Image (spheres, grey):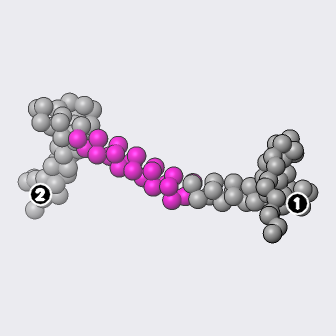
């Protein structure tokens, strides 16, 4: 029982080689019909849209909250420092130049 007849392992190896060569031909851009090309384009479009969707999720779930947290802390620190230096009055909200021109109505005493 020598290896004179092709055994199942040789047939499998041959069929694997054929499937590899067929798949490599299709990945090179050679298509038998326009239907195969349309299917390939639809797959590529679907993958592109999934990638864009993943980027949107990344931005909305990770980047925006991190940036918001950073800017919120900087803004609150700046506001607290301003409060400590000028107090909570017209100057705090409008600045020195504009606060000089703004006259708030005085409370009426009756």
User: Is 33 in the magenta?
Assistant: no
Q: Residues within 10 Å of mark 2 (few under 14, many from 20)?
A: few
Residue 10 appears in the figure: no
* Quadrant location, the N terminus: bottom left
Where, by quadrant of the figure, is residue 105 drawn?
bottom right
Is residue 58 rendered to the left or right of residue 51? right
Q: Nearer the viewer, residue 47 or 18?
A: 47
Where, by quadrant of the figure, is residue 78 drawn?
bottom right
Q: Nearer the viewer, residue 69 or 97?
A: 97
Q: Which residues are magenta?
A: 42-63
* Quadrant location, the C terminus: bottom right
Up-down: is 17 above or below 57? above
Where, by quadrant of the figure, is residue 57 drawn?
bottom left
Give the residue at mark 1. 87
Give the residue at mark 2. 7
Q: Position of residue 28 (x, y in %)?
A: 27, 32
Q: Position of residue 2 (x, y in %)?
A: 13, 58
**Residue extending farthest front:** 110
Q: Position of residue 4 (x, y in %)?
A: 10, 53
Mark 1 or mark 2: whose residue is earlier in sequence: 2
What residue lies at 82% left-to-right and 49% top-to-bottom?
A: 103
What residue lies at 90% left-to-right and 56% top-to-bottom?
A: 86
**Residue extending farthest right:** 85
What residue lies at 55% left-to-right and 58% top-to-bottom?
A: 62
- Nearest to viewer (mark 1 / mark 2): 1
Residue 108 appears in the figure: yes
What residue lies at 88% left-to-right and 60% top-to-bottom?
A: 87
**Residue extending farthest left:** 5
Q: Is the stretch drawn in magenta largely helix, strand or loop?
A: helix
For the residues labelled 1 and 2, the Cα–Cα distance comes to 92 Å
Instruction: Identify the element where label 2 is drawn.
Output: loop
User: Is 47 in the magenta?
Assistant: yes
């Amino acid at each position: 029982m020598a290896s004179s007849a092709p055994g199942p392992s040789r047939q499998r190896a041959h069929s694997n080689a054929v499937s590899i060569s067929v798949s490599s031909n299709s990945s090179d851009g050679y298509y038998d019909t326009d239907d195969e090309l349309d299917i390939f384009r639809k797959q590529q479009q679907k993958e592109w849209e999934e990638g864009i969707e993943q980027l949107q999720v990344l931005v909305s779930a990770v980047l925006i909250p991190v940036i918001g947290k950073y800017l919120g802390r900087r803004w609150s620190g700046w506001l607290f420092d301003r409060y400590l230096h000028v107090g909570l009055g017209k100057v705090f909200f409008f600045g020195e130049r504009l606060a000089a021109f703004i006259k708030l109505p005085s409370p009426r005493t009756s």
